[in-house]
Amino acid sequence: MMRDAVFLPLTMEAAGSCGSGLRSKAEAANRAAAECWTALVGDCDTPSRRTLILTLHDLSEATAGTVQYRRVTEAEALIDEAVREGDGEEFAEALVGYDLAVATVLSRLRSQSA
């Protein structure tokens, strides 16, 4: 049995104990990243390549008003650029930065609400 790929492992972990709205945005972003990666590797122009940034932006908005917001939006822009260029290596690097930035915010939000 094949497990779903986790492209945003830190974010998924941090979102695990957040409210269901944040958790569902994180899950959607993770699925979109996996679909986009598959399209990039296959050099296919699929809808997932065009809609990934919208899905990530939904999650990014949850970080608005935080110190990390600029880091999140910068990483989001790098992902968008990599997808447009079809650069898988750049995509992977940008996704790691995005994952770390979003997870940092979600962890802080979780600890503040505890």
Image (spheres, rainbow, N blue to C red):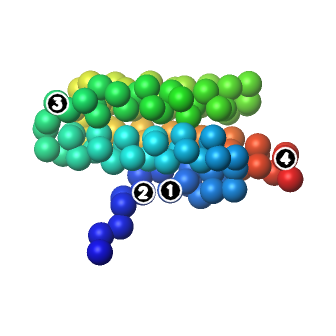
Give the secondary structure at mark 3.
Answer: loop
- Give the CA distance from mark 1 to mark 2: 6 Å
Tell me the residue at 29%/44% (across/down). Answer: 35
Q: Using the rendered view, name the quadrant where residue 69 is placed.
A: top right
Q: Residues within 10 Å of mark 2 (few under 14, many from 20)?
A: some
Q: Would residue 81 appear left or right of 12 to someone viewing this image?
A: left
In the depicted view, which residue is nearer to us: 110 or 72? Answer: 110
The disc label shown at residue 85, or none: none
Question: In this figure, which residue is indicated by the disc labeled 2?
Answer: 6
- Give the CA distance from mark 3 to mark 2: 22 Å
Question: In this figure, which residue is indicated by the disc labeled 4?
Answer: 113
Question: In this figure, which residue is indicated by the disc labeled 3?
Answer: 45
Percent across and percent down for residue 42 are: 14, 44
Tell me the residue at 69%/41% (across/down). Answer: 105
Q: Amino acid at mark 2?
A: Val
Question: In this figure, which residue is indicated by the disc labeled 1?
Answer: 9
- Give the CA distance from mark 3 to mark 1: 25 Å
Q: Amino acid at mark 1?
A: Pro
In the depicted view, which residue is nearer to us: 71 or 19? Answer: 19
- Give the CA distance from mark 2 to mark 4: 26 Å
Q: Would residue 54 appear left or right of 89 to someone viewing this image?
A: right
Percent across and percent down for residue 86 are: 22, 32
Above/below status of 84 relative to 6? above
Q: Residues within 10 Å of mark 1 (few under 14, many from 20)?
A: some
Frontmost of labels 4 and 1 is 4
Image marks 4 and 3: residues in contact by CB distance under 8 Å: no
Q: Amino acid at mark 4?
A: Ser
Image marks 1 and 2: residues in contact by CB distance under 8 Å: yes
Percent across and percent down for residue 26 are: 53, 44
Image marks 4 and 1: residues in contact by CB distance under 8 Å: no
- Give the CA distance from mark 4 to mark 1: 22 Å
